Amino acid sequence: MAERRADDVHPPYLYPDYKSTRLRAPVQPLVRVPPSPLEVTGPAFPKAFVKESEADLTTWGRSAPLGEKMVLVGRVLDGDGQPVRRSLVEVWQANASGKYPHPVDDHDAPLDPNFLGKGQVLTDDEGRYRIVTIKPGAYPWQNHAFGWRPAHIHFSLFGHAYAQRLITQMFFPGDPLLAVDPIFQSVPEAGRNLLIADLDLEHGIEGVALGYRWDMVLSGQRATPMGV
Amino acid sequence: MPKKPTPSQTVGPFFARELLWKDGGTVLFPGRWDRITLTGCVFDGAGAPIYDALFETWQADSTGKFPAGDDGARPYGYGRVSTDTEGRYAIETVMPGSFKGPRGETHAPQISVSIFARGLLKALQTRVFLVPLEAVKDDPLARAIGDPERLRTLIATRDSKDPKLYRWDVRLRGAGEAVFIEY
């Protein structure tokens, strides 16, 4: 297994309580190299790639989806706290019943014809993003007896450089399932709070939607991603 | 005071309808270049195909120039596919050219690859070379690896019948395990 850096907040590859890691985690240590000049550049997503409507996951169907409507705001920052501007943020999630519209999701829960559970947005000049959605439901999984995933929203980020690419999950404050979720618990203790959104009522919609806030930090700095 | 990065989490099994792009396996570049296909299978530590991996690529064009811009709809230079039930991926693209590093070192023709999957709590990143072993020895990653047997796990082999086809299988764990990198 790859050795750990002392300040590493990322999970290890091998985390036996999350069973799928046992056959997929590499055994050999990773080879550490600086990002190549290619890898400090990254794909440029044209404006037309993202439609404004894709930031609102609740308007896809003929009527409103079931569930607790929420607004999520936050910023994407680099390691110096500088905004990551005009970068792609992709989100996807289960519906309010904890069901994905995916053929291999065998959770016996209803699909919501008004909820597709996917969206995307480009950060603005301050690195900010805002999405409107419903709170996803928890769902059972077969990793271990009585296992349930805590409610979470998947995030995929491109940053400014290929070397900053990140896929992660956002969780909700106060969720008792966090303490027993091997995927969340795989993160070293120092990093766990970084995956939990804050309640931020003022960014909700009065009488309509709860507000949450979650900032994300990518590796490296804009001028010199990953310290190269 | 540098900020702690947001920890990585697995992409999970349910991403195909959410993340895949139409024609994401066709990598776009401005201008006309000879096209090649990089294809192979991704295997786990038991030798079983990984049928639910997200496979992404980023590369230079055939002159070694890095992609910039887009065709109006999608960025140049980026490939994004999932593996199929046999663990197979395929990326139809241009032959990447070599490029120079900041100290004048030459990076051999290569494609940067990120693999995400259920059971991968963070991406596996590596670089696949599209030239024979003898032609990559001075590449910075090849030098960092040293051992030619390990380096061989990153060499795509050109098909003997179809010169436009390059094959590269990826074993994530155990015998024949590919070299993966961190920054």
Image (cartoon, helix red, strand yellow):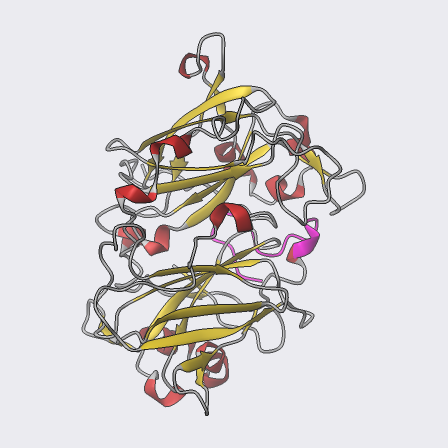
Q: Could you tell me which quadrant the C terminus of chain B lies in?
A: bottom left
What percent of the width, then of the height, locates residue A185?
Answer: 62, 40
Residue name at image x 51 percent, y 55 percent: A4
Q: Is residue B10 above or below residue A94?
A: below
- Is A45 placed left or right of A28 in the picture? left
Which region is colored magenta?
A1-20
What percent of the width, then of the height, locates residue B128?
Answer: 41, 73
Residue name at image x 43 percent, y 54 percent: B22
Where, by quadrant of the figure, is residue A186 drawn? top right
What percent of the width, then of the height, locates residue A26?
Answer: 58, 65
Task: For residue A103, say whether it is visible.
Answer: yes
- Is A105 placed left or right of A173 in the picture? right
Q: Is residue A13 magenta?
A: yes
Front one among B14 and A79: B14
- Is A190 placed left or right of A216 in the picture? right
Q: Is residue A134 magenta?
A: no
Front one among A71 and A194: A71
Where, by quadrant of the figure, is residue A135 drawn? top right
What percent of the width, then of the height, locates residue A216?
Answer: 40, 36
Residue name at image x 49 percent, y 7 percent: A207
Looking at the image, the residue that sits furthest to the front is: A62
Where, by quadrant of the figure, is residue B30 drawn? bottom left
Figure disc tally? 0
